[in-house]
Image (tube, helix red, strand yellow):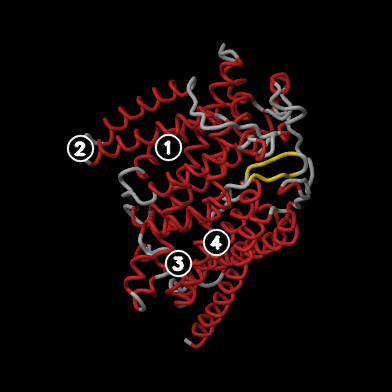
Amino acid sequence: RYGGISIVSVGENLMGRKARYLFLIYVLFTLILVYAAFASIAASLFARDPRVATLSILFMPLALLLGIMMYRMGLGMGPSTVITVVLVIAAFVYSYNHGVVIGTFDPSLPPGEGGWVAYHRWVILLGLYSLLAASLPVWYLLQPRDYLNAYILWAGLGLAAIATILLGTQSLKGPAYTSFQPNIIAGQPTPFWPAIPLIIACGSLSGFHSLVASGTTSKQLASELDALFVGYGAMLLEGALAGLAVIIPISFAWNAPELIQKGVIENNMLDLAAVPRYSVGYGYTLAKTFEMFGVGFDTGYSFFTLFASLMLSMYVLTTLDTGTRLARFAWQELFDWLANVDKNLYSIVTNKWVASLAVVIIGSALAYPVLEIGTGYMAAYNVVWPAFAGANQMLAAIALLTSALWVYGVLNVRGGTGLLILLPSLFLWVTVTAGLAWWLLVILPVLPAIQQFGAGSMILFTLLLSLLLFALFVINFNKLSRQAGAS
């Protein structure tokens, strides 16, 4: 496991200190985009369905209670889990009829007419939450909350898989093909290649995961042999989740008459924004499944729409505070050179509250705007998501290139086995580079000024950083090849 060091440190060992700082800057910018995208999604979720906000808020003290019971009271994992899961179910029942409303929300109205008050307030409150959560000890909130999340996500995945099997192919409504260049990102024609990494984000490959896997997960493995099961198995599950996220809202609920009758959609599921599309599609699919067992459609739809929103909320909040914590670490490491210049300034700049606050302020500024696209209004994630996705996939490409260099230079693996890592990483790097260039040329000019300056400058800078890192990779790969030839 190479000492359990992060992919950033692996890059430094193989390509030098320059690579380390380039890596850290890239990681920091990517994580800020992660924060912006997920803060916007969470704020949109809470504003659209205040019940999700209630349940998410109640979930936090329950996670704290779980941590205290396990680590301070010594109850053990089993009893602590049972008690907390029962309380989570009770919280879900309470939230079903109680929503936290902190302002008006009507996405059909422009922000100036009060349509997005709740959204803007949630962006601010989520910033305060992230600032606090990223600075607390891991065992206090993050670890027990992620542990509880696992039960919700497993239940959601299991129910979705069962529903897909029971409904079968005869229930599929969505078209097998629509277009290879639909209007997706910012309402612009979006070609399948090279833009697909800007849409999928982490459903296929994720640089964000490479940071956690290399520096954190590797330390927690009981044996190096477990890496295959944990790493490969987790990515298969991520792919399964991505597949179900496409199948359920599109294939089953495409133009469902029940949804048209309710006024949820006019023609098909593409009438909805991405976040409600998932919740509505999940609610519809599970409602039709449980209708087979005598549960009324309206009851099932209301229940499972809330459950789908809860699943998404838990996933989003986990990414939000974990991403903020990782960005804080990247910020602190990026300024470690200050310790030799001015220790007082170093202690201020790298203070955990200062580092977290910097990330939250920049990320919130990107998440806050509401965009006018066509004749409607959309939350910032509709634009920030492709920027985050591209940066995330590029980080994955760079991590793969670094891994290929490690296999070549440290393990001394040559031939076909080495190419199994090298060729996919090169293909991914070329694809994402082309995708980010397309985003800068086509999408950036139609964005609001704050997004042009914020997300645009970050994507431009990360693209330049990736070119520099790729150049370092080529230089060091050739160097290792010459050394291998000489020996």
Task: Kindly state the secondary structure of the residue where label 3 is placed.
Answer: helix
| Whole-number angstrom distance, CA of label 3 to CA of label 4 | 11 Å
Task: Kindly state the secondary structure of the residue where label 4 is placed.
Answer: helix
Task: Kindly state the secondary structure of the residue where label 2 is placed.
Answer: loop
Classify 10 Å Cα crowding around label 2: few (below 14), some (14-19), many (20 and above): few
| Whole-number angstrom distance, CA of label 1 to CA of label 2 | 21 Å
- Image side of residue 412 versus residue 450, left or right: left
* Residue 132 sits above or below residue 16 on the image: above
Q: Quadrant of residue 298?
A: top right
Query: Which of pointers 3 and 4 lies earlier in the amino acid sequence?
Result: 3
Residue 468: x %, y % from top left: 58, 74
Inspect the image, locate mark 1, and give the three-letter code of the amino acid beneath it.
Answer: Asn
Residue ID for mark 2: 74
Residue ID for mark 4: 395
Identify the residue at horizontal 39%, vertical 22% (top origin): 90
Inspect the image, locate mark 2, and give the three-letter code of the amino acid beneath it.
Answer: Gly
The residue lying toward the viewer, choosing from 465 and 223, is: 465
Residue ID for mark 1: 149
| Whole-number angstrom distance, CA of label 1 to CA of label 4 | 26 Å
Identify the residue at horizontal 29%, vertical 39% (top origin): 67
Question: Looking at the image, do the residues carrying marks 1 and 2 touch, with CB atoms under 8 Å apart?
Answer: no
| Whole-number angstrom distance, CA of label 3 to CA of label 1 | 28 Å
Task: Kindly state the secondary structure of the residue where label 1 is placed.
Answer: helix
Inspect the image, locate mark 3, and give the three-letter code of the amino acid beneath it.
Answer: Val
Identify the residue at horizontal 56%, vertical 35% (top origin): 118
Residue 219: x %, y % from top left: 34, 57
Residue 483: x %, y % from top left: 49, 85
* Residue 182 sits above or below residue 7 on the image: above
Inspect the image, locate mark 4, and give the three-letter code of the amino acid beneath it.
Answer: Leu
Give the numbered dot on residue 8.
3
- Image side of residue 263 versus residue 457, left or right: right
- Image side of residue 263 versus residue 394, left or right: right
